[in-house]
Image (tube, grey):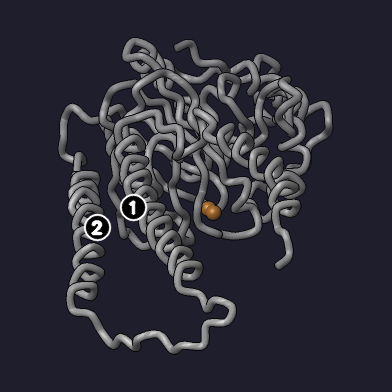
Amino acid sequence: MMNRWPVVKRLLPLLAGMALLLSACGREDLSALNPQGPVAQEQLGIMKLSITIMVLVVVVVFAIAIYVLFRFRRKPGDQTIPKQVEGNHKLEIIWTVIPLILLVILGVPTIQSVFGLAQDYSKDENAIQIKVTAHQYWWEFEYPDHGITTAQEMIIPTNAVISIEAQSADVIHSFWIPSLAGKIDTNPGGNVNNMYFEATKPGVYLGKCAELCGPSHAYMDFKVKAVDDASFERWVTAMKEPATLPEDAAIAETFTSQCLTCHAIGDKGLQGLYPNLTGMGSREAVAGFLLNTDDPKYKNEGSVYDNLVRWIKDPEAVKPGNQMPKVDLSDEEIEAIAKYLSEQKLDY
Ligand code: CUA
């Protein structure tokens, strides 16, 4: 027989490397394997339970199969036909009952969690109500109890139940914040889906669209920013403050006629149809995914100003298939508008 040890020996470093690589998975801001709130924690618990049961079954079945292969193989010189056994009641009962027990162990907590996590907080006065509307390719977040609508960045208080009513303005998308909760489809036609989640500590958690929805599906990111209660209240107040237009009268006029016919900023512009621009300067990203950072570990890095210029100059090149038109403005005008927007910071 061929000696397989050298092959195994060569694979060992690879396996060890993979184990190391996988153990580094689980980014705090983006991984279901590194939960940051009770909902994600419970979902990870179910994953661990089911994987443990599966691994147990695989190990036991393989161990028995390998044992039988070696123990009962035909030996050299042995010509006798072994005793032919057809059926064994005791064994059959054992291998029927064991899977039944395993299914009960898996089923009871799974069903408990499924119904527990489906709890509806939409009438709960202590929960923060947020209406999520997905659009090709951006996210609208409306806080009906606070009279606020924003885009791309959901600000939430920590340790509060966030009750989500999710739907879509066009095609089916899926709302997913891996480190906070499992995903939920957003459907068109007034078909609303509910979910809830909670973040236990302040931080920025990345959200994704998890349903193929068109050419820019992969860029349909959003952020959930969890802050303490006082910051959340300050944010709510700051969002409601009246907007100041650019100081330069000509730029103010251009901004009003070119941008505010679709967008809103503070109390000005067209409300509720396209992404709200209030507090653009304090956002984590432009267009949902051009990160406002100088950290070279992220591609697309740049300041909020750089990203705004890039985005306004050619939206189609940045995010194919989106509805933002290329505006007929000079570079100077675009830069002035980007500068103004990048200075619109919310103090919270
Ligand atoms: Cu929206 Cu994918």
| Count of numbered tags | 2
Tag 1: amino acid: Ile
Q: What is the x, y in percent for residue 34? A: 45, 32
Q: What is the x, y in percent for residue 11? A: 71, 48
Quarter of the figure that contains the N terminus: bottom right
x 44%, y 45%: residue: 176
Q: Nearer the viewer, residue 104 or 15?
A: 15
**Residue 102: mark:** 2
Q: Could one spot residue 10 in this view of the protein?
A: yes
Tag 2: amino acid: Leu
Disc 1 residue: CB within 8 Å of ligand 1: no
Q: Nearer the viewer, residue 297 or 16?
A: 16
Residue under label 1, please give it. 53
139 vs 242: above or below:
below
Disc 1 crowd, CA 10 A, few/some/many (<14, 14-19, 20+)? some
In the figure, residue 294 lies in which quadrant?
A: top right
**Residue 22: mark:** none
In the figure, residue 234 lies in which quadrant?
A: top left
Q: Is residue 38 left or right of residue 345?
A: left
Disc 2 crowd, CA 10 A, few/some/many (<14, 14-19, 20+)? some
87 vs 213: above or below:
below
Q: Nearer the viewer, residue 31 or 9?
A: 9
Q: Nearer the viewer, residue 5 or 104?
A: 5
Marks 2 and 1 sit apart, C-alpha to C-alpha, by 7 Å
Cβ–Cβ under 8 Å for marks 2 and 1:
yes
x 21%, y 48%: residue: 109
Quarter of the figure that contains the C terminus: top left
Q: Is residue 233 left or right of residue 171?
A: left
| Of pointers 2 and 1, the one earlier in the residue sequence | 1
